[in-house]
């Protein structure tokens, strides 16, 4: 490579780096702004110019959120419902995906088309039906009521089917020759060979469920049954909007998800690469 | 250990009948090789025995028990796959134990069998590794080990050596032969490599186009090929085929080759007429005296212990002749060729073979 070439290459690299950095700053700034503002006094927040650092940092909004609201219950409700949604969605989708990918039974194709088609229907259009249904079942203001309508995630089935499709046929045949029952083929061969997908799908589903707002907002009216995303809307009161206080509770609400992602980030990436390796 | 019998089995994929009415008996402890070109139905036939493909018609008897409708796991046979199909998330030990755990064998017996298999295959040191930490040859051995621990009535191999490099293939082939002698189990082995077939088999089943062309010991198949196909498929370099006009009188026959030369032989054929004359290179000698015919040497291959002479006869037909290691023949020379008439074969237009005495 000549030096001119090398220089051009470096310039190209530099431009890309600069663009990336700008994009990252643009993307991260609102988050930074939100976090910083949650440490400001209310009147500082509404000042008309940009202050990148609080003048008098304070924890009073956090203190308020933690002591004056039912954030403890909200956390509990969120954890319980998000875990419930994750475990149920992933385990049922796993079974359905496996059946469609590996078993031959009448109605397999229509079922598959149905699932593909339901992928096209946004759950929001069904929300009135869900509400009436859940209300009739007497499940408003319960964990079950929050969880049930959120179990509709055809994409998880679709991903599982694709991954199971790509396990070479010989593994199944070897297991069949080895006298393995269908259940053992699933649990001892197909699931372990696709741990990566299960991990990734679980994390993604958990984050979806944790961030869900519209349905939990409709399904719950009693403050102590609210999930955290719904609960934090309750910190504004009759006297108007408290930006800093709301931001502080928003930070508290997002914190576990951010933490989970930071902890699992490597695991998620690694998991996806691993599963890709099996496919190859 | 058990014998395996196929009785008039057939198999269709959709509307296409691929296996038509095949019968075959594999004796207890016998090593039988299914040999044939790609698409000849070797794998399909093996997988029908394994239970991975259904048998549409006919019977499969394993150890005298009717098995055609049993699930693969209940047929008491073990299969070794071409790409091994070792479970990547299990150690070698777990891979071998999997099949035994599935039938609920107790852990002590499992440990014993795995240890035995490890000893037989000399891979005790590898038991706690995962497949990804093994070489191709070692994976191959684990795949065989996984079959051995089941102590099956029969072993089925589908091209087990084709993923190995040439040197390792030869070594593993020898090990397989030794393994067969040691455990004396019934084995059916699929390959398209005739060297593997010749070296390993007690009997070879030659398949072509999903039909059995011939069943016989390696030497029978080599010396007395039942058809033109078998004659051409077995042996390397391949048999020479020459167009010939044959006149017969009782047990004697005279073949007139394309270049006008005449070859006399002792063979019983139904009619005079057009035949193909087949002769292996080692039965065609380069001679200093007068031969049966002459040709021009086009290519000379020195293989050390022997020399292959590619000769073109007067009518343009190519014939490969075998000469000694110190052959003086050079390309361009005119060579006299003598046929060993006791090793001649005649093939009629339907491919049926008649062997000279
Ligand atoms: N699942 C299938 N569906 C339809 N046709 C099939 C199927 N499997 C095999 N065949 C056909 O059956 C015939 C025999 O195939 P088979 O795999 O037994 O050949 P083979 O002798 O094992 O060849 P190779 O040496 O390439 O493995 C082929 O013509 C093939 O196209
Ligand atoms: Mg095959």
Image (spheres, coloured by chain):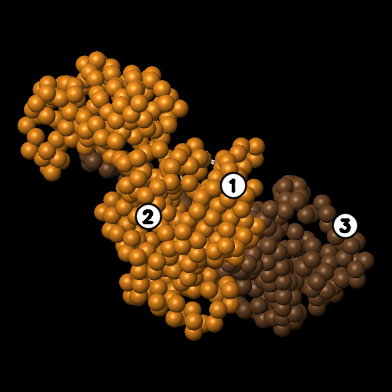
**Given contact means CB atoms under 8 Å apart, are the residues at marks 3 and 1 in contact?**
no
Q: Distance between the residues labelled 2 and 1?
A: 23 Å
Circle 1 is placed at which residue position?
Answer: B8
Are both tags, 2 and 3, on one chain?
no
Question: Image quadrant of residue B136?
Answer: bottom left
- Residue A94 position (above or below residue B222): below
Query: Which chain is assigned brown?
Result: A
Q: Name the residue under label 2.
A: B202
Whether the residue under disc 3 has CB within 8 Å of ligand 1: no
Please tell me which residue lies in front, A69 or B94: B94
Is residue B65 in sight in this rendering? yes
Q: Where does label 3 land, which residue? A: A129
Q: Position of residue B355 (x, y in %)?
A: 34, 34
Q: Are marks 3 and 1 on the same chain?
A: no
Residue A16 appears in view: no
> How would you rate the neighbour count of disc 1 (Cα within 10 Å): few for under 14, some for 14-19, many for 20 or more?
some
């Amino acid at each position: 490579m000549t030096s001119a070439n090398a220089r051009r290459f470096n310039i190209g690299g530099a431009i890309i780096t600069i663009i990336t950095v700008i994009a990252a700053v643009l993307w991260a700034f609102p988050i930074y702004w939100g976090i910083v503002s949650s440490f400001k006094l209310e009147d500082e927040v509404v000042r008309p110019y940009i202050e990148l650092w609080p003048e008098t940092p304070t924890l009073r909004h956090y203190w308020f959120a933690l002591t004056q609201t039912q954030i403890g219950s909200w956390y509990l409700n969120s954890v319980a419902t998000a875990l419930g949604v994750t475990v149920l969605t992933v385990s049922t989708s796993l079974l359905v995906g496996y059946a469609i990918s590996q078993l031959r039974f009448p109605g397999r194709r229509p079922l598959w088309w149905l699932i593909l088609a339901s992928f096209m229907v946004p759950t929001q259009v069904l929300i009135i039906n869900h509400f009436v249904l859940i209300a009739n079942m007497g499940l408003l203001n319960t964990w079950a009521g929050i969880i049930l309508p959120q179990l509709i995630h055809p994409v998880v089935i679709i991903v599982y089917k694709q991954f199971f499709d790509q396990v070479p046929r010989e593994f199944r045949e070897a297991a069949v020759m080895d006298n393995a029952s269908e259940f053992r083929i699933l649990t001892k061969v197909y699931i372990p060979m696709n741990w990566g997908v299960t991990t990734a799908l679980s994390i993604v589903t958990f984050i979806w469920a944790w961030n869900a707002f519209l349905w939990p907002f409709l399904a719950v009216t009693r403050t102590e049954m609210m999930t955290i995303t719904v609960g934090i809307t309750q910190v504004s009161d009759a006297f108007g909007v408290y930006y800093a206080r709301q931001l502080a509770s928003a930070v508290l609400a997002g914190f576990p998800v951010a933490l989970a992602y930071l902890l699992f980030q490597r695991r998620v990436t690694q998991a996806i690469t691993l599963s890709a390796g099996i496919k190859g | 250990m058990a014998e395996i019998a196929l009785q008039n089995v057939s198999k269709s994929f959709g509307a296409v009948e691929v296996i038509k009415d095949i019968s075959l008996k594999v004796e207890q402890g016998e090593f039988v090789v299914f040999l044939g070109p790609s698409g000849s139905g070797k794998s399909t036939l093996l997988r029908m025995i394994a239970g991975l493909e259904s048998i549409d018609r006919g019977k499969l008897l394993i150890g005298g028990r009717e098995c055609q409708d049993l699930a693969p796991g209940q047929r008491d046979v073990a299969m070794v796959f071409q790409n091994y199909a070792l479970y990547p998330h299990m150690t070698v030990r777990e891979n071998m134990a999997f099949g035994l755990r599935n039938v609920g064998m107790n852990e002590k017996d499992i440990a014993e069998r795995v240890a035995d298999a490890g000893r037989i295959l000399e891979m005790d040191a590898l038991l706690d590794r995962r497949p990804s930490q093994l070489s191709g040859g070692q994976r191959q051995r684990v795949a065989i080990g996984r079959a051995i621990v089941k102590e099956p009535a029969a072993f089925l191999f589908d091209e087990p050596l084709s993923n190995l490099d040439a040197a390792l293939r030869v070594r593993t082939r020898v090990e397989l032969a030794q393994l067969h002698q040691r455990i004396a189990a019934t084995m059916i082995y699929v390959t398209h490599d005739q060297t593997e077939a010749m070296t390993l088999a007690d009997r070879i089943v030659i398949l072509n186009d999903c039909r059995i062309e011939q069943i016989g010991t390696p030497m029978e198949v080599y010396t007395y090929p039942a058809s033109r196909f078998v004659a051409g498929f077995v042996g390397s370099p391949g048999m020479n085929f020459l167009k010939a006009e044959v006149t017969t009188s009782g047990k004697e026959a005279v073949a007139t080759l394309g270049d006008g030369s005449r070859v006399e032989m002792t063979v019983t054929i139904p009619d005079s007429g057009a035949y193909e004359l087949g002769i292996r290179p080692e039965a065609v000698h380069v001679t200093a005296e007068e031969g049966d015919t002459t040709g021009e040497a086009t290519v000379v291959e020195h293989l050390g212990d022997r020399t292959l002479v590619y000769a073109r006869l007067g009518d343009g037909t190519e014939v490969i002749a075998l000469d000694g290691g110190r052959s003086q023949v050079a390309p361009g020379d005119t060579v006299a060729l003598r046929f060993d008439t006791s090793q001649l074969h005649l093939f009629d237009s339907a491919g049926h073979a008649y062997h000279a005495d």
